[in-house]
Amino acid sequence: MKWLTSGVPGLDQVLGGGIVAGSALVLAGDAGTGKTTLAQQISFANAAAEHPVIYYTALSEPNAKLVTHLEQFDFFERDRIGSQVEFIYLGELITHGNGDMSAVVAEVMRKVLEAEPVIVAIDNTATLRDYADERELRRAFYDLSGQLAYAGVTLLLVGDYPLADTQMGAEFALADSIVHLAYEAHEPVDQRWLRAVKVRHAKHLTGKHALTIDTTGCTVFPRVETLNFGEPTEVTDRIPSGIPGLDDIMGGGIGRYATCAILGPSGSGKTILSLQFIHEGLKRQEGCLYVTFQDTPNQLFKTATSFGIDLQTPQRDGRLIIHHVPSDQLNLDILAAGISQSLAGGGIRRVVIDSLGEMVVAARESERFPAYMRSLIGLIRNAGANLLVTSETTMIGPALRPAEESMFLFHNVIMMRYVELPDRIGRALNVLKMRNSEHSTQLHELHIGKHGMKIERPLPNVSGALGWSVLRATVNEPGV
């Protein structure tokens, strides 16, 4: 089979390799979902002087208005109109046919013989139902798709069809591929997505895939759960955490390529622990990635500097990447694509995501989160990196769902808590879980000073740890 590229980042991957030459592709969706922009991007990516694209408009927006709309996109080149991308209005043939589509088919095939195009597009085919019955449309689509397939010309049909309509209608029965686009309210920001409903010639990626439209045109971000990252890298030797005392209670450190969840309420020290973990990697000349949804890079620089950690120098020399995603712009698949791009160079060995709970709340996709997180962990581990993730808990209670429901995915789980000591409120840390490793089960006092965090002596006689109540140390040991 000969393949055409869509010219849309991510779409060829979703379609299983691209668009098969001579096939019929339907772009469906409600008005305003980006179908025409996507069709035009495909057209300009494939058009050439010897094999142009013929773009028919059928009672949709006027050609002049369509061209004006396209001028905002980088893929659009006005000097190619006419010679490589030709716009032809079909309205008169449709309205004067009295329900007979044979004149439309004849016009398209006449142009195919004349121009030898690579793609013939018709936009908006949904309007044809106002002028012809289902039987006539079926005959017309059958004749058109059959003759174009014989000539090796790809047929691109664009129409205002809701998702339910893709299960009926002649154009969908005859189509080799159906792609549905949607634009839905998704607080705090609306989101676009795309789904490959049907692909005959290849194994496509299922599910909803994020879609963005900006001045570069359309970009598709494949759903990370549909990607295959192979077998995860085995956890081997230990790496130092960078937190004094923590490696001792973790049996020698964090397993290489392991995943670690840090749970704790606001202000308990999760970000400080994360910064020290990254700093330790930087000292060892390891590439590091810090993903943050609340703190900007400048805020992280300021926090790190207060503990004697310089992050600006390694960021300038490329050893540290700070990926800041404001919560109101967060999309799970776009985030995964950004992390994947950062890992592509092969030098990243430590990744921090701060924080898991905030990501879930902002993404508003809690039902898919465990499967998403499993795939994201696979992506990071197969890139040869350790992952440390923070997650917010209530002040005296458990992690916020669904972060709590994802803890089984992590090799290590560390809990940070406030503790009521006889003379003050202190901080405490304990290792709840280490997979295939011995570790301390005691609750240890945690101290944060000008040089950062360190783990100190065990706290005796503490009650309430498993009941999610206030932790109390009932005996005032010397030095407490």
Image (cartoon, helix red, strand yellow):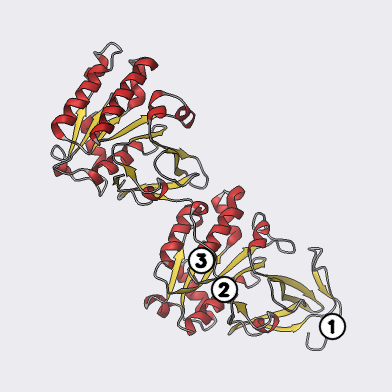
Q: Is residue 219 above or below residue 160?
A: below
Q: Earlier in the sequence, mark 1 or mark 3?
A: 3
Give the image quarter of residue 96: top left
Q: Which mark is residue 232?
A: none
Q: Residue 260: x percent and y percent?
A: 61, 70
Q: Is residue 344 above or below residue 49?
A: below
Q: Which mark is residue 274?
A: 2
Left or right position of 26 against 46: right
SS for dot 3 = helix
Residue sitting at x 58%, y 82%: 242
Amino acid bearing label 1: Asn
Q: Nearer the viewer, residue 251 or 72?
A: 251
Q: Is residue 105 above or below residue 77?
A: above
Mark 3 neighbour density, 10 Å: few (under 14) some (14–19) many (20 or more): many
Amino acid bearing label 2: Ser
Q: Earlier in the sequence, mark 2 or mark 1?
A: 2
Please give the residue where the numbered disc 3 appears in the rendered image.
380
Q: Earlier in the sequence, mark 2 or mark 3?
A: 2
Proximity of marks 1 and 3: CB atoms separated by less than 8 Å? no
Q: Is residue 81 above or below residue 137?
A: below
**Quarter of the figure that contains the N terminus:** top left
